[in-house]
Image (cartoon, coloured by chain):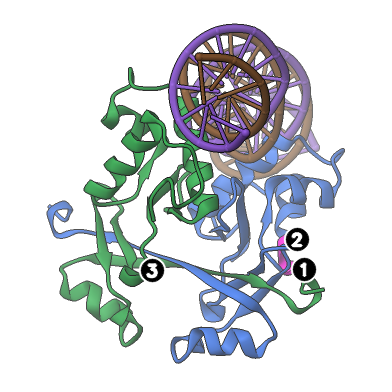
Chain colours: A blue, B green, C purple, D brown
Amino acid sequence: MSIKEAGLSVTKPRLNILNFLNKNHGPFCAEEIHNNIGVDQCDLATIYRCLSTFELKGLIKKCYFGDDLVRYEINDPEKHHHHLICKNCKKVENVGSCFLKGVDKLLSDKGYIKIEHNLEFFGICPNCQH
Amino acid sequence: MSIKEAGLSVTKPRLNILNFLNKNHGPFCAEEIHNNIGVDQCDLATIYRCLSTFELKGLIKKCYFGDDLVRYEINDPEKHHHHLICKNCKKVENVGSCFLKGVDKLLSDKGYIKIEHNLEFFGICPNCQH
DNA sequence: ATAAAAAATTCAAGTCATTTGCAAAAATAT
DNA sequence: ATATTTTTGCAAATGACTTGAATTTTTTAT
């Protein structure tokens, strides 16, 4: 989906941000995006505002890696995947959804050790469906 | 594991916190714990410090629900489970690990709708294993 | 195109969960 | 008990993120 298709005004900061996310792998936090597109290109507050707006429109999605940073990546439902993050160097690898048959085996095959995962489900419970 | 077994000094705030977590279901954030054991019982900073220490010692574990709060619950490896959080009322239900065969079905059987999950893996990658 | 209207950006100040420095108090070791 | 170590309380700091309001840019209407 493009910025215009999302019903948003097309601005330089927005083009820069989407462009950066489209070309680079791994979810990024606001500051990383800011640094990468150039801190002189726009204010950090603009990055935050653009990211919220993009997420609201479904252009990008949030990722939580268990630290105090919110990260974002392009939202492509066709390419659903999970993440494998090194606890040490924070490197991010994508993991396909085939993991359901033997999660830890798959990951240890990749050479990782001390594998953990964080899995939380979200939904609307019966009481809240009106 | 007890506070003493973890090699820590036994103090009132620590006993209060562990006691609260042992008796109540659902991960709790620092402020919830503080309110529940009584704000006059100790400083909020003490709660934060105790929780970090407990986690380091493996007495409790962190949970991330995708907001900006860190929650904790007793770490009992025998009772490994995941969480199902209502997006609306934030109610937390435990989900056993049987979910691997048909995640969404299981959850919709419980009457939930708009089910999503957040799954991230953590490990030490080959490069970081020395 | 051009002007008016709408939306986005900037900058500064404000939040809010969490952290930290340091002196005082409590717990543990001797 | 007394010394040593650890923990706590309080206040101040941090750091990611948000927000208010004036200005600039983009869009819409002419």
Q: Main secondary structure of the magenta part?
A: helix
Magenta segment, which residues?
A19-25
Report the Cα–Cα distance between label 2 and label 1: 6 Å
Residue tagged 2: A19
Would you say B34 lies left or right of A91 here?
left
User: Which element type, helix, strand or loop, lies under badge 1?
Assistant: helix
Check if mark 2's residue and mark 3's residue have beta carbons within 8 Å.
no
Amino acid type, label 2: Asn
Q: Are marks 2 and 1 on the same chain?
A: yes
Q: Quadrant of the N terminus of chain B?
A: bottom left
> Which numbered dot is residue B77?
3
Q: Name the foreground residue: A3 vs B96.
A: B96
Check if mark 3's residue and mark 1's residue have beta carbons within 8 Å.
no
Q: Residue at x 60, y 74 (%)?
A: A114
- Nearer the viewer's eye, disc 3 or disc 1? 3
The percent coordinates of residue B93 (x first, y second) are: 24, 60
Amino acid type, label 3: Pro
Q: Residue at x 70, y 58 (%)?
A: A18
Q: Quadrant of the C terminus of chain B?
A: bottom right
